[in-house]
Amino acid sequence: MTSAVSVEEMVKETGMTVFSGKEYLKSKMITTSDISRPGLELTGYFQYYPAERIQLLGMTEISYARKMEENKKQAVMKNLCQADVTPCFVISRYLPVPEELNQAAQAVQIPVLRSKLPTTRLSSKMTDFLESRLAQRRSMHGVLVDIYGLGVLITGDSGVGKSETALDLIKRGHRLIADDRVEVYQKDEQTIMGEAPKILRHLLEIRGIGIIDVMNLFGAGAVRTETEISLIVHLENWGPDKQFDRLGSAEQKVRLFDVDIPKITIPVKIGRNLAIIIEAAAMNYRARTMGYDATRAFERNLNALIKENSTNND
């Protein structure tokens, strides 16, 4: 889990420009994804001022500041700038930066940033970036692949064939996100995201060959940086004493953070093409999410046949 993100990282990610305080970007750290719009504070109300948040000023705040009395404006801007607490000020729509704010910010080494984006879009962009960077993370053993736009996490014991299956899927036109270790985090109440650790990005380990760079061998279209995890496919060595679901009616779930992810278990046996099977599993899952369930269709047909045979026997 990342406890803080530098203002410099956020500037690079969101494409903002630095109005002043460029030398403070690396040292200023953001510890929360919440964004504050200091409207009440401009009126002089500081009883509850979340100074640890990014302070975002849009058209409303800048217009109000223009009409403030000079002495009051200087006092308010000075109170907004909390040394060692406030990470930065952000001005949307390339609006003019109040000189009083800029002077007060520079006095306590707080960067002032600007963006051409409207206030709401800018706030959403910063929040998305910060939530992904500051979210609690978990490292999982497995391979994450994008199959027809569906994030499939392949799990199983070491040596069961996860990486080899991923290589086969890549050759079939699908995309690799992570091999061996998958960094998992919760984006929102319904979404779990997965990405590769930086040191393993675009790399795949194949026993007998070693490490291969998927991007260099297969091109940029064969990899992705991250994806939502929609399905977990667990590979398990087949055995005569093991029972596996044959109809697809035994639904399994794996809870990651606060979200339940569907899981299917596929037996591994010599002669089985796991890549094609996993590809079919992903397509079948997508069909279910769109309202078509082959298992239920089979059960309906079976019940209709039983009813028909019962009527004929009568």
Image (cartoon, rainbow, N blue to C red):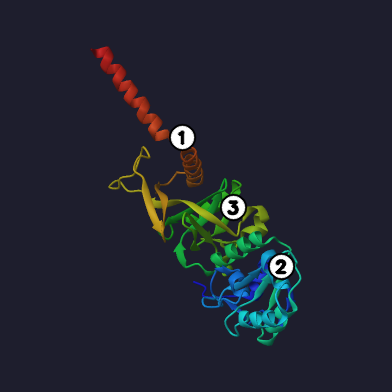
- Local crowd size for mark 1, using a 10 Å CA cut-off: few (<14), some (14–19), many (≥20): few
- Give the residue type at disc 2: Ser
Mark 2 or mark 1: name the one nearer the start of the chain: 2
Mark 3 or mark 2: name the one nearer the start of the chain: 2
The reply to whether residue 21 is visible in this rendering is no
Cα gap from disc 3 to disc 2, whole angstroms = 48 Å
Nearest to the observer: residue 283 or residue 241: 283
Q: Tell me the number on the disc at residue 79.
A: none
Nearest to the observer: residue 171 or residue 249: 249
Mark 3 or mark 1: name the one nearer the start of the chain: 3
Furthest toward the left, the residue is 314
- Give the residue type at disc 3: Arg
Name the residue rendered at 70%, 75% in the picture.
Answer: 68
Cα gap from disc 3 to disc 1, whole angstroms = 26 Å
Vertical position of residue 241 compared to residue 66: above or below: above
Residue 67, quarter of picture: bottom right
The image position of residue 166, as x and y in percent, is 53, 53
> How many numbered marks appear?
3
Circle 2 sits on which residue? 63
Circle 1 sits on which residue? 292
